[in-house]
Amino acid sequence: MTHAPVALFVYNRPWHTRQTVEALLANDEAAQTPLYIFSDAPKDASANKAVAEVRAYIAGITGFESVTAIERSRNFGLANSIIDGVTQVCQQQGRVIVLEDDIVTSPYFLRFMNDGLGFYENDERVISISGYVYPIKESLPETFFLRGADCWGWATWKRGWSLFEPDGKVLLKKLEQRSLTYAFDSNGTYPFTRMLKNQIKGKTNSWAIRWHATAFAENKLTLYPGRTLVHNIGVDGSGTNCTPTDDFAGDIATSIIEVRSIPFEENNFARQQVMLFHEGLRSSLPLRVLRKLKNILAKSTK
């Protein structure tokens, strides 16, 4: 099996970074996995100490096939750092598994990512592999496809990432011209189009909404696990625009999720369950909290 490299993006949260790395090391495949760590530079003097702590920690990381640390000399910001880093690794290695410093993985995460990347490597209908799935109450299939892309522990190939459109205006025009905005908004249950418009206006700098919009506009599919393989520990109030919440947390997978042949189409049952989840959030949470959660999902800043 070819083991895809992991691109890990870190900034100023040493505790979160340590949890993410230690969880990844619990995967059997870690010893055969090259790790690329992109460490962003401080935005201002107030971040100097924490960034230095993170860099001191990553300098001592072992247990992977190799560890390459890329320490930014200037502050890129999350979106630009991810876009640049994913592009670099894809160009060099042809595929990449992407993590941020607040994504704790199951011991079976790397197995699923590598199996998915290998199984669908030559099928251009599939743009990415996701390790995260919403905490749906109903039992989901072992694996399934949804249209679009995700951002909490994911993987892609050079061919998939080459489609990424960084210009939000171009993406919005495509969605509107093809009458896709309602479907893009999960049939009106989640305001992804508004998030894209906010990125265009400069209210956020989300790479994730552009990645999702790229995949959706191009009618590409992402493979999902029926049980989540990741847990986001960053929604604890430690990051900018982050309201503490456990609404997106589910029981992390404690066994292997097998990648098998399934129909190349969006799974209607899973899509309906996602819409119900979105509707539940909208009906049960105060507006101010929902606004914060949208910022979290947009991955705008840390």
Image (cartoon, grey):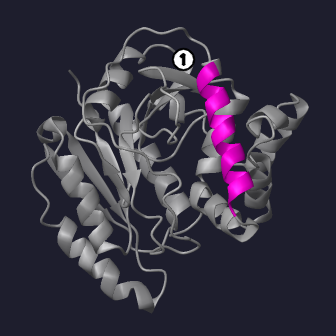
Residue drawn 28% across and 42% down?
106
Query: Which residue is label 1 attached to?
Result: 124
Q: Position of residue 116 (x, y in %)?
A: 37, 23
- Indicate the amino acid at tag 1: Glu
Relative side of 97 to 291, left or right? left
Q: Position of residue 164 (x, y in %)?
A: 60, 39
Residue drawn 75% across and 66% down?
287
Q: Quadrant of residue 42?
A: bottom left
Asked whether the viewer can see residue 68, the reply is no
Q: How many marks?
A: 1
Residue drawn 72% across and 45% down?
279
Give the camera-side residue of 157 and 180.
Answer: 180
Q: Quadrant of residue 227?
A: top left
Residue drawn 34% across and 19% down?
118
Q: Main secondary structure of the magenta part?
A: helix
Q: Is residue 293 magenta?
A: no
Q: Is residue 284 magenta?
A: yes
Assess disc 1: are there few (<14), some (14-19) or many (≥20) residues with their C-alpha within 10 Å of its C-alpha.
few
Relative side of 299 to 173, left or right? left
| Residue 147 drawn above or below residue 252 | above
Q: Quadrant of residue 52?
A: bottom left
Relative side of 90 to 63, left or right? right
Asked whether the viewer can see residue 220, the reply is yes
Q: Position of residue 250 (x, y in %)?
A: 43, 46
Give the camera-side residue of 14 and 173.
Answer: 14
| Residue 120 drawn above or below residue 78 | above
Task: Quarter of the image for the N terminus: give it.
Answer: top left
Q: Residue furthest bottom?
A: 45
Label 1, secondary structure: give it.
Answer: loop
Q: Which residues are magenta?
A: 269-285
Q: Position of residue 158 (x, y in %)?
A: 46, 31
Give the camera-side residue of 218 and 18.
Answer: 18
